[in-house]
Every structure is written in structure tokens, then in C-alpha cells.
Image: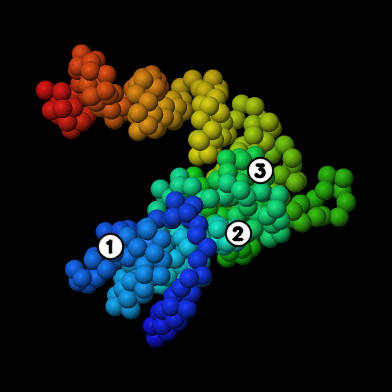
Amino acid sequence: MRYKLSMIFLLFLCLRFFANYVISKDYLDYVQFDTNIALQTEEFEEVFKQAIVFYEEAFYDEAFKAFSKLLNSDSDNAFLLNAIGCFYGGVGQYDIAINLFKNAIDLYPRYTKPYYNLGITFTFLEKYYEAVEYYIQTIELDSKYKNLPYHFDDVLINDLKPSKAEEFYKAGFIAHAKNKEEAATSLYLKALELNTLIAEQYFYLDTNEVAPITKKHEAPAPQIIETQKVDGSEPEKTTTFYENGLSYLNQKMYDNAIDYFTKAIEADPENSLAYYGLGKTYYAVKLYYKAINAYLSAIQADPQFSNAYYELGQSYAMIEMYEDAIDAYLKVIEIDPKDSSSLTSIGMIYYNQGVAFSKRGMYNEAIKAFLKTIKFYPEYANTYYLLGKLYYDKKNDPIKAEKMLIALEVLDQELYSALYGKIF
């Protein structure tokens, strides 16, 4: 009933606002919609096509009369609602566009385009925090949207004036979208200072998952241990802060773990294990910048702490600081030459870079990256397969492509057969 009433009100608005047009050509450059939409009859499909022609020729009254006719006859078509919403937004009728996008979402909650279009619309209305909320929902549904433009070009970070944790986080999102990484990091960290569990509500752009975070005090209170002061004064109650932090971390009660690792550090600022545990906790909840700081503190307290260097590399890799990650992994190998996990991790960094270069048509760079992968992680069969394809398809070098077959024959018969079939 609520949906039908909203559609009736929407149709009223559509008819009322004819001729009140403020053309915004940029708007249609950003929003996303489908033009090949399945409608109830061929006649309606022709009406839709004609409406688009009217719109493109700036006969807006005729276009929107046709759109209203379609809305009246096919109001349960989420794709149609989203498309028409874009056309209304293009002439400045943002309120109508917002209603259409929201109705499309009501009908089809996993349809990503209306979420993204709501973000664009609120950006045009300069309601930036509302825009970010919808962008985040879009990325949660489909991570590819994190690479699309968000129309924040003219937004001045200083004008956002955040005051709450959520607003600092969203301001950080905007700064990140504007490639102002230093400002973004500062804003994210401020959000975390105000609310250490902000990652439960939102997430960093390098992932679309948030680790579950439980509420405090869901586990029994930690054991209190009576100790006697060395100077013989009154006994004081202390807790094994580090052990309690470790216990909470193992139970995935991350907020409690942070509390107790922090207390352990306050009691002993040189406690490298407490810093390490704190880093592991922050990493678990996707707070990679904070994890990095904790691991660096652990290493400062214990320069030979190889596990801290390894986890530091993992954290750097998650925020795509690959050179720093490789330096951290190499430090692990320096401390422990028998360590193989760091070699594998370095190899995977180069492998992922090779895949990225290949997708962008940078084939020489991709080949160099894959060759580095083989140096550090020679057992990874996928590398030889992709290298063979590049040599054969892009470099016209079947001899080098055949050399990749030699390794694949030992490592992976399935990939060997796939590459063999391609070459021969």
C-alpha cells in the first residue's frame, strides 16, 4: 500500500513539474541506466524509445508525458524507474529522480544502479554525506563501483566540517575519491578516535567486507590476580592485560581485545607482544593504518620480531603500499633466511601487479612482474600460464611460450593442457 501511494504521489509530481527545467548535462554523464528495457508490450517499448528521442531533442514536455504514461502502466519495473529517474535528474528534477530511484530499490534491493544514482543525485544537491552513504551501499553490492567517478571534483574538504565519527569517515571517503590520500588517512583516523568500532558500520575502500565485531562484556570478566608490590606496600590488583587481550582476540571479541592490549601497553610501553596483538586485532577489523602503527611500535620495541615484520607486510599490501610490503617481507627473510611465507607473499605481490598491468595493456611491464613472481614463488603455476599466453598472444614469441609449458607439465596438468591447446 505504501509503495502504491508513493507511486501515485510521484505521478502527481511528474505532471506538476512540467516546464520547470534546469538542464544539467553533466548529470547524465555520471548516472547509470539501462536503455534496452523489457516492457510489457512492443507498443510500450516504442513509447520508451520515442520518449528518449524527444528528450535528446529537448522536447521535454513530450518526453515526460510519455514517461508518465509508462510509469502509469508499468510501475513495478525497477529498470524503467531507474532510467526515468536519470532523465528527471538530467533536467534538475532531483526530488522526482530520488523518489524513482528509491522505488526502484524497493522493488529490486540488489539492483546497484539506483544506489549509485542516488549518490550522484545527492552530490549534485551538495548533500555529500548522504551521497557517500549511498555510494558505500553500492560498493557493498558490487565492488567495481569503487573505481567509478563520484563527482566530488569541486568539493573542498575544508568545507565539509565533520563533527561525528560517521561524518569524519565519510569525509575521508570523499578525500580518497579526490586522490587526497594524506587527508583521507587523517580523517579516517579521527573517525576511529571518536568511535573505534566505526568499521562495523562502514569499511575501507580496499575491501567490501567487515569483520564481525561483538559488543563489550560478552565474555566473563578477566581473572584478577593479587600481587604484592616489590617495596612491600599494600597489595594492588593488576590484570594479565596481554593474556586477556589475546583471549578476547581468539574469541573474535575485538573491541575487548583492543582495550586490554592498550592497557598492557600503558603498563609496559616496551611490550612488543602487546603491540603485535593490537596490530592483529586492528587487521582483523580492517583498520590497516592502525595495524601498521601497532606493528611498527612492536618492531621498535623488538627489532628482531620477524612475525611483526611479516604482519606489517600483510597490512601494507592490503592498502596497496607494495614497495613497503616487500621491504617488510625482505626484513623477515633477513632475520630468518629459512622463512618461505615471505617469499611467497612477495611473489604474489608481483603476480597481482602482473595481472593488473596485463589488463591495462601494459604487456612488457606485466611480463617483468611475472618473471619476478617466478623468482620469489616458482611453484605458482598460474604465473607460467599467463606468461605463456602473453608471449604467444601479445609478443608473438612461441618459443618463450613453449618454455612455460615445461614448468606447467610438472606443476599443473590442467593449465599445461590449456596452454598447449592454445599454442598448438
Q: Which residue is mark 1?
A: 49
Foreground residue among 44 and 329: 44
Assess whether mark 2 and mark 3 are in contact (beta carbons under 8 angstroms).
Answer: no
Q: Amino acid at mark 1?
A: Lys
Closest to the observer, 87 or 291: 87
Circle 3 residues within 10 Å: few <14, some 14–19, many ≥20: some
Residue that numbered label 3 is attached to: 183
Q: Residue at coordinates 82% horizontally, 55% vertically from top-left?
A: 235
Front residue (pair 213, 320): 320
| Residue contact at pointers 1 and 3, CB within 8 angstroms | no
Q: Quadrant of the N terminus?
A: bottom left
Determine the residue positioned at 24% across, 70% down.
Answer: 44
Question: Residue 184's x, y, as percent?
Answer: 62, 45
Q: How many marks?
A: 3
Residue 418 locus on image (x, y percent): 17, 31
* 82 left or right, relative to 247: left
Graded by Cα atoms within 10 Å as few (under 14), some (14 to 19) or many (20 or more), the crowding at tag 2 reads: few
Q: Is residue 19 visible?
A: yes
Residue plotted at (41% across, 66% down): 60
Residue at mark 1 to residue at mark 3: CA–CA distance: 46 Å
The residue where tag 2 is placed is 126
**Secondary element at tag 1:** helix
Q: Are marks 1 and 2 in contact (CB under 8 Å)?
A: no
